[in-house]
Image (spheres, rainbow, N blue to C red):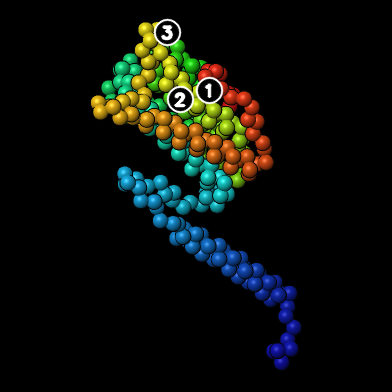
Amino acid sequence: MLANRPIGPRNLCLQLVLMFSSKILFRFFIAFLSVIFLASCSGQAIKRKDGKTTAKPWSVAGLAKGDIDDVVELHQKETIASLKLLTEKLYKRNPVEMSKAGITDVQTAVAKIFNPVNHWHLSPQRELDWAAAINDAFREDFAGDRIHSLMTGALTMIMSSYNHKTEVYLLDSMDPQKLYNAARNIEIIAWRLSNAKKPNGEVLFLTNGVDHEGVQNLSFEREYGKLIATQDLIARVVEDKTNRGIRFGVFNAASFVLLPI
């Protein structure tokens, strides 16, 4: 009878191939459904008062990231956004600086500093001596755009604290000490901006002020405080993740000595 007919080697191999193929196809189908499901599970974007959104679109590259990697990227973006806002404020209060480079529009001057972030891995700005650029901005004999020198140095310093990465993945390693030192350097910059003076006693940069009704405008102080807090927080997060301790030491913002990154 056919039921008792032995299965030949050829038929046995064919059945095994069909069985394994069906398993592979099934696993591929499950993986495909998982990708579609993850893509559809993105949360709603935050509704901000200025209408902007920072919602991050889903991508396959996101599968190579951990939760901490996303947190690091978010903190970096917030830090750069604060630097950009401070640059705009400085140019608006000190327009003579951008005029030294023949620029009359604040947005153009700001873009000249921050556009390289979009292709940072190719930008020659990565090799900038950021400490020298920051210090040049406060030199009495410096004839160039002080704000450009200062904020280009600050941006490069911040990017250096993130190991010059704009995207962080599971195998990437961050140094909490660099992130912490960057926060201390921002404190030094904030102190010097508020206290630097020309030989005649006038302030070198106009920052905080008082309006015609005597109300203080402390927007610079608030933004610098936010910037410092953001860097300090991500330094602690990375410290917990990597179990690498931060050396706090004694710090004095008025010392003018920028910490290494």
Q: Residue at x 67, y 41 (%)?
A: 243
Residue 202 at x, y percent in the picture: 36, 12
Q: Amino acid at mark 3?
A: Asp
Q: Amino acid at mark 1?
A: Ala
| Percent coordinates x, y for residue 231 in the rendering | 52, 35
Instruction: Give yes or no for contact between labels 1 and 2 (Cβ–Cβ under 8 Å).
Output: yes
> Which mark is in front, 2 or 3?
2
Compute the Cα span from label 1 to label 3.
23 Å
The earlier-in-sequence mark between 1 and 3 is 3
State which quarter of the image contains the N terminus. bottom right
Disc 1 designates what residue? 253
Is 53 left or right of 257, judged from the image as shown? Answer: left
The three-letter code of the residue at mark 2 reads: Ala
Q: Secondary structure at mark 2?
A: helix
- Please rate how many residues cluster around mark 2, counting C-alpha atoms within 10 Å: few if below 14, some from 14 to 19, many from 20: some
Residue under pointer 3: 141
Question: Does residue 24 lie above or below 110 as drawn?
Answer: below
Give the secondary structure at mark 1. helix
Residue occupying the point 55% across, 18% down:
255
Q: What residue is disc 2 on?
A: 190
